[in-house]
Image (cartoon, grey):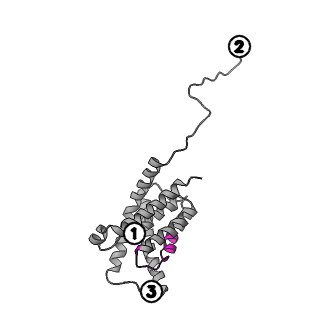
Amino acid sequence: MNFFQPILILAAAFLAVFAEATLPFPRNVLGAQVDLLPALMVYAALNAGLPTIAALAVLGGMWFDTFSANPLGVAILPLFVAGFPIYLRRDLLLREAPFAQFVLGAAASALTPALTLLMLLSGGRTPLLGWGTPWQWLVMTGGGAVATPFIFALMSRCEGALGYQLRQETSFRADREIRRGRKLK
């Protein structure tokens, strides 16, 4: 079994959460923080197995909740819910098409904060809601949608540069001559 791809996905999730927590540039310019975990979940759902999706949801959700005002563990279920239906239908989806990646990234980036907000409200919490909430939701949706094709390209380049390719050996050699017909004495 190849453990390189799950490790690469989880390392990218860790770096994405770290970048979201430490880089103030997108938050100061746009007025909202772009969440890269739903876009990474789309990549994992289309290219990895179910254990990798679950590990990304659990670890990515915990890492994200550590740096946010959310209660610990509230982002796990929305991330998993965003990735699991894509995983179930990934044989029908155009995973190499950037437009399909954009649309799936937009859907996952819109669904994840909405489900997190729903879980917070149903859990008796009072999150900060105001007139800027729809703008923040739109920025998160648009940012995740734009980031998804870039994540696909970056992850494929990392897999190509750091991973190994299986060598396909055939029994056919190009320099071999095959004689057919009767054998002459």
Where in the figure is residue 99, as x and y percent of width and height? 41, 59
Where in the figure is residue 71, as x and y percent of width and height? 46, 80
Q: Is residue 94 visible?
A: no
Where in the figure is residue 176, as x and y percent of width and height? 59, 25
Q: Which residue is mark 1?
A: 35
For residue 184, which numbered disc appears in the image? 2
Q: Is residue 60 above or below residue 165?
A: below
Q: Which residue is mark 3?
A: 125
Q: Residue at x 44, y 80 (%)?
A: 117
- 25 relative position to 79: left or right: left
Q: Is residue 110 visible?
A: yes
Q: Nearer the viewer, residue 26 or 11?
A: 11
Q: How many marks?
A: 3
Q: Quadrant of residue 114?
A: bottom left
Is residue 72 covered in magenta? yes
Q: Earlier in the sequence, mark 3 or mark 2?
A: 3
Q: Earlier in the sequence, mark 1 or mark 2?
A: 1
Badge 1 crowding class, 10 Å Cα cut-off, few under 14, some 14 to 19, many 20 or more, is: many
- 151 relative position to 180: left or right: left
SS label for mark 2 = loop
Q: Nearer the viewer, residue 24 or 148?
A: 24
Where in the figure is residue 75, as x and y percent of width and height? 47, 74
* The magenta segment: 67-82
Q: Quadrant of residue 155?
A: bottom left
Mark 1 vs mark 2, foreground winner is 1
Three-letter amino acid code at the position of disc 1 = Asp
Q: Quadrant of residue 39?
A: bottom left
Three-letter amino acid code at the position of disc 3 = Arg
Is residue 54 covered in magenta? no
